[in-house]
Image (cartoon, grey):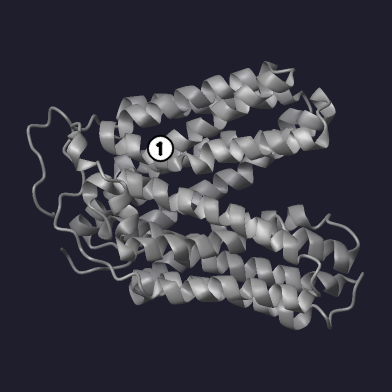
């Protein structure tokens, strides 16, 4: 392997296949976020569902996506990424088209389940394929894989930032128009993958059996738990932060701008941060350092919130500090965590491991949300101190994630190429 080096890496400098994966991630998130942030309002005001029914529909969508990532990952290992990605795109097109015309509770539930399951197919397949190609690129050029994964992450966040802007414009027409625009975007993503994603040799069933062995690997389990600590902390932007804003400012109006601040920071700063960290920090160190930064954001709120005057412009300062530190931590740890997965599991289980990382984290968020909900009545310093302990403990777990460089091939050669990799590049 060539000596690691860092350079100013942009999407235009990536190999064509990695450019396609990154560009379609951007497009996929634009189509997704053009619709989903406005779904709750459409369900309540447009269709007339009761509040409990809106919550049920949104919960079912999250379960059908995050909870089934492991299924999408296992299917990726069994059949290769191409058919799983294409199936995910087709189901997302069908789901958004169905959602555009759904007018009853049953049809809405069916549509959102289809939308969620489509992401459970698409995302693990694309993320595992991107990680595999990032390792190949690292071995061929010496550029750390974290830089490639940082570009991928920044593209996804750019989509999350641009999608709501597109959705807001389309909602002046109708919610149906936003859904149909999403259909058009996903059709373009489908066409891109159908044209450029190679066909892979199918893997024998025995190579992916025993999925429990993935979580039985102590290093990978430590990674899952450490990453879960990050996602539990990130979920507080949806749960604890709005409550705190209501307490200190009298409203939750600042939630939207704070989310926009987070997305904009990732779009503007992700690549410089990843380039800096890739040249100085080992992946495990980047993971633990990112978690410490996340913990620091909660600690700032715990230490200052009691002293900042309420109902003034200063009341937002602790929340801004939380968002900035959490986002900086995210920019360090997310590419590092994704880049560690290929070094911790058998290559033929990379899709399953990528899906398991998300599914285990999703279960942790579910449990963590219930626990946080029970703690929201605590005094603010005590609540935020407890919340700071979660990513801090996760940072300790991250020190147990010792990479083991695989000697197995990083992916199979495209079908029909006449060659198959048998050793690292």
Q: Residue at x 37, y 61 (%)?
A: 221
Q: Quadrant of residue 39?
A: top right
- 342 up-or-down from 312: above or below: above
Q: Quadrant of residue 237?
A: bottom right
Residue 255 on image: x %, y %: 76, 56
Task: Locate residue 364 relative to residue 9 in the image: left or right.
Answer: right
Residue where numbered disc 1 is placed: 71
Q: Residue at x 18, y 32 (%)?
A: 201
Residue 64 on image: x %, y %: 54, 35
How many tags in the picture?
Answer: 1
Q: Residue at x 34, y 69 (%)?
A: 401
Q: Is residue 276 visible?
A: no
Task: Locate residue 212 relative to residue 356 in the image: left or right.
Answer: left
Quarter of the image that includes the N terminus: bottom left
Closer to the camera in the image, 139 or 112: 112
Q: Is residue 39 visible?
A: yes
- 147 up-or-down from 316: above or below: above
Quarter of the image that includes the C terminus: bottom left
């Amino acid at each position: 392997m060539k000596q690691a080096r860092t350079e100013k890496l942009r999407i235009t400098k990536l190999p064509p296949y990695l450019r396609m994966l990154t560009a379609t991630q951007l497009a996929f998130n634009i189509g997704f976020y053009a619709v989903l942030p406005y779904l709750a309002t459409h369900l309540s005001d447009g269709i007339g569902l009761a509040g409990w029914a809106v919550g049920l529909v949104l919960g079912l969508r999250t379960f059908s996506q995050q909870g089934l990532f492991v299924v999408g990952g296992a299917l990726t290992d069994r059949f290769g990424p191409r058919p799983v990605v294409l199936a995910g795109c087709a189901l997302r097109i069908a789901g958004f088209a169905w959602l555009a015309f759904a007018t009853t509770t049953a049809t809405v539930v069916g549509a959102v389940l289809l939308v969620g399951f489509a992401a459970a197919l698409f995302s693990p397949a694309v993320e595992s394929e991107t990680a595999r190609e990032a390792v190949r690129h690292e071995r061929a050029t010496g550029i750390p894989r974290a830089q490639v994964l940082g570009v991928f992450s920044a593209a996804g966040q750019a989509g999350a930032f641009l999608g709501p802007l597109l959705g807001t414009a389309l909602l002046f027409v109708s919610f149906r128009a936003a859904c149909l625009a999403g259909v058009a975007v996903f059709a373009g993503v489908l066409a891109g993958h159908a044209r450029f994603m190679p066909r892979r040799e199918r893997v024998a069933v025995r190579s992916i059996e025993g999925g429990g062995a993935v979580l039985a690997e102590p290093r990978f389990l430590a990674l899952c738990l450490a990453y879960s600590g990050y996602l539990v902390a990130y979920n507080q932007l949806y749960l604890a932060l709005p409550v705190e804003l209501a307490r200190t400012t009298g409203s939750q109006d600042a939630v939207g701008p704070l989310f926009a601040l987070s997305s904009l920071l990732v779009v503007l700063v992700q690549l410089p941060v990843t380039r800096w960290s890739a040249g100085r920090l080992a992946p495990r160190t980047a993971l633990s350092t990112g978690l410490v930064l996340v913990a620091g954001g909660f600690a700032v709120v715990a230490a200052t919130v009691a002293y900042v005057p309420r109902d003034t412009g200063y009341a937002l300062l602790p929340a801004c500090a939380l968002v900035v530190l959490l986002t900086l931590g995210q920019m360090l740890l997310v590419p590092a965590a994704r880049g560690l997965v290929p070094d911790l599991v058998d290559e033929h289980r990379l899709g399953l491991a990528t899906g398991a990382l998300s599914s285990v984290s999703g279960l942790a968020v579910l449990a963590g949300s219930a626990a946080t909900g029970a703690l929201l009545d605590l005094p603010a310093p005590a609540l935020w101190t407890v919340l700071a302990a979660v990513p801090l403990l996760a940072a300790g777990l991250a020190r147990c994630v010792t990479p083991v460089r695989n000697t197995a091939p990083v992916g199979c050669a495209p079908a029909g190429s006449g060659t198959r990799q048998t050793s690292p590049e």
